[in-house]
Amino acid sequence: MHPIEVLLVEDDPGDVLMTKEAFEEHKLGNRLHVVSDGVEALRFLRREGEYADAPRPHLVLLDLNLPRKDGREVLEEVKNDEELAHIPVVVLTTSEAEEDVLRSYRLHANAYVPKPVDFEQFIKVVRQIDDFFVTVVRLPQG
């Protein structure tokens, strides 16, 4: 099994740390890359500038509330870009607003997962996402 390249788009250092810990604690079969805003996410995905040699992610974990360009805009741009549209995007956010859920799915998010505030629950959720996308589904390569 090849490692899965995962792009985490998250501006909260605590959530980044918890996600990294979830990946490390359970020795998940993937590589985590982190950017902290929507502009950087698109640059990473499009391999622009300092990200010219970045791997193409197999999965994106996307927060909605981001600086510079929010997650909704990132999701819309990714799903409207022929080169990127095939990459599964899981919205992983604190927002439980029905309008955010509906809009995310209208923009073709592959899943919408509310972030638990409890550390153990957060770890469990990240592990379930990983289990599903690494062991259950077949992801496109490249």
Image: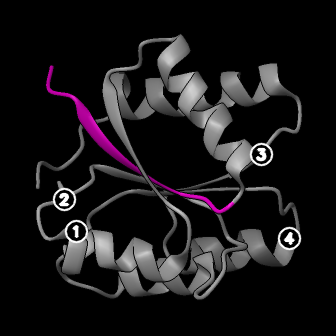
Residue position for label 1: 51
* Inter-mark Cα distance, 1 to 3: 28 Å
Dot 3 corresponds to which residue? 115
Location of residue 82 (image quadrant):
bottom left
Q: Residues in magenta?
A: 1-11
Identity of the residue drawn at 59% across and 24% down: 21
Q: Nearer the viewer, mark 1 or mark 3?
A: 1
Q: Residues within 10 Å of mark 3 (few under 14, many from 20)?
A: many
Q: Residues within 10 Å of mark 1 (few under 14, many from 20)?
A: some
Q: Amino acid at mark 3?
A: Lys
In which quadrant will I find the N terminus? top left
Residue found 30% across the figure and 69% down from its top: 44
Location of mark 2 (residue): 54
Give the residue displayed 19% in from the left and 73% down from the top.
Answer: 47
Which tag, 1 or 4, sits closer to the chain's start?
Answer: 1
Residue 93, disc: none
The residues bearing labels 4 and 3 have C-alpha atoms spaced at a distance of 15 Å
Report the mark closest to the observer, 4 or 3.
3
Checking the image for residue 98, the label placed there is 4
Q: Looking at this view, is 90 or 32 the one in front?
A: 32
Which of the two labelled residues, at mark 1 and mark 3, occupies the earlier sequence position?
1
Residue 127 in view of the camera: no
Q: Position of residue 99 (x, y in %)?
A: 82, 78
Question: Please, what is the three-letter code of the amino acid marked with disc 2?
Answer: Ala
Mark sitting earlier along the chain (4/3): 4
Instruction: Tell me which amino acid carries mark 4.
Output: Glu
